[in-house]
Amino acid sequence: MLTVTVCAAQPARTNPFHGSAEHIDAGRATFRIYCSPCHGIRAAGGDGPDLTRGIYEAGDSDANLFNVISDGVPGSEMSAFGGRMNNNSIWRIVAYLRSVTQDEPPDIPGDASRGRQIYQGKGGCSSCHRIAGKGGRLGPDLSRAGRTLGLARLRESVIAPNENITSGFDKVTVVTTTDGTIQGRQINIDNFSAQLMDSQEQIHSYLREEVRSIESERTSLMPSYAAVLSASELDDLLAYLVSLRGE
Ligand code: HEC
Ligand code: HEC
């Protein structure tokens, strides 16, 4: 009896719906509702990672996928879905993801080592971004960008940064009674004070009475590289960004 109870509380380790067309369709429908806003309508990535590559940081088995969907990734936008859907729904999503997995890695024509030179040289990217602890802080850390962002989102970030501002990195303009006008990335703004980081990475902090106005713009502090990089340089840079997968 006891063994049965324990087993019943644990999800199966193998996917009961693997390869079943009917369940894959159901999984696709659930995915569209809950997951596509971040992972893209075809699971190929959006603000969240591409899930069609068959390589997952969480581990590549069906059980690993089940667990990460159920438990989420702490400290990221990937929340736990275990409380919102039952085990069978999660398994159907896993079956769907397996059905769209490409065996080949995404076809990126660029050359990652040339891309790295562009990143460090012509692009000047490291003045604002950190990779493995090195670089600037005005923009987000890119150490894991190849895992956490899909190719389409990476491309868009470089050529059209205003399209999709990473949350927490809004550009704000604060007019102060003490220091004139300061522009930078918002660190914290509430009813009592405002903190921001300017392009020199200086942190400025003002009390409410020192602030004349605060304007938050939906524009990026990052310049667009659409006119700066050639098509082949952009491919090289993207190949490099996709290769950034943390340790
Ligand atoms: C609000 C945005 C968002 C939503 C909604 C979302 N995810 Fe995620 N997901 C992410 C992000 C961001 C990550 C990367 C987390 C990290 O590693 O930092 C992620 C990671 C994952 C991973 C792990 C990938 C890996 O390489 O280990 C899987 C699998 C996954 N999501 C599946 C799903 C499924 C299935 C749903 C819907 C039930 C879903 N996600 C909904 C943003 C989201
Ligand atoms: C002047 C500073 C600056 C420079 C230079 C810069 N960026 Fe950015 N970048 C930012 C800021 C700020 C953001 C966050 C706002 C946004 O989403 O546009 C950002 C966002 C990004 C993102 C999205 C990250 C995420 O987690 O959502 C990527 C990818 C990126 N930059 C890559 C690059 C690359 C590649 C270069 C060089 C070709 C570059 N950046 C140059 C400031 C910069």
Image: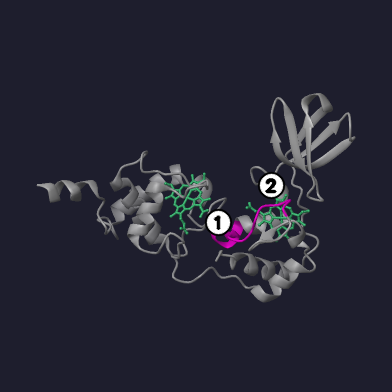
SS at badge 2: helix
Identify the residue at horizontal 66%, vertical 52% (top origin). 140
Residue positioned 82% across, 51% down in the render: 200
Q: Residue at x 29, y 59 (%)?
A: 18
Residue labelled with disc 1: 148
* Image-based side of 173 in relation to 98, left or right: right
Residue density around tag 1, few if under 14, some if 14–19, many if 20 or more, within 10 Å: many
Q: Is residue 75 above or below residue 246?
A: above
Write down the region rendered in magenta: 137-152
Q: Nearer the viewer, mark 2 or mark 1?
A: 1
Beta carbon of the mark 2 residue lies under 8 A of ligand 2:
no
Name which of mark 2 and mark 1 comes first in the sequence: 1
Coordinates of residue 195 in the picture (x, y in percent): 74, 37
Residue 204 is marked as none
Residue 139 at x, y percent in the picture: 71, 52
Indicate the position of residue 155 as horizontal and vertical percent values. 66, 59
| Amino acid at pointer 1 | Thr
Image quadrant in which you'd find residue 125: bottom right
| Quadrant of ligand 2 in image | bottom right
Residue 186 visible in the shown view: yes
Label 1: state its secondary structure.
helix
Q: Nearer the viewer, residue 16 or 184?
A: 184
| Residue at the image point whose x is 67% and y is 69% from the top | 235
Residue 163 is tagged as: 2
Badge 1 residue CB within 8 Å of ligand 1: yes
Asked if the residue under mark 1 is in contact with the one under mark 2, i.e. CB atoms within 8 Å, the reply is no
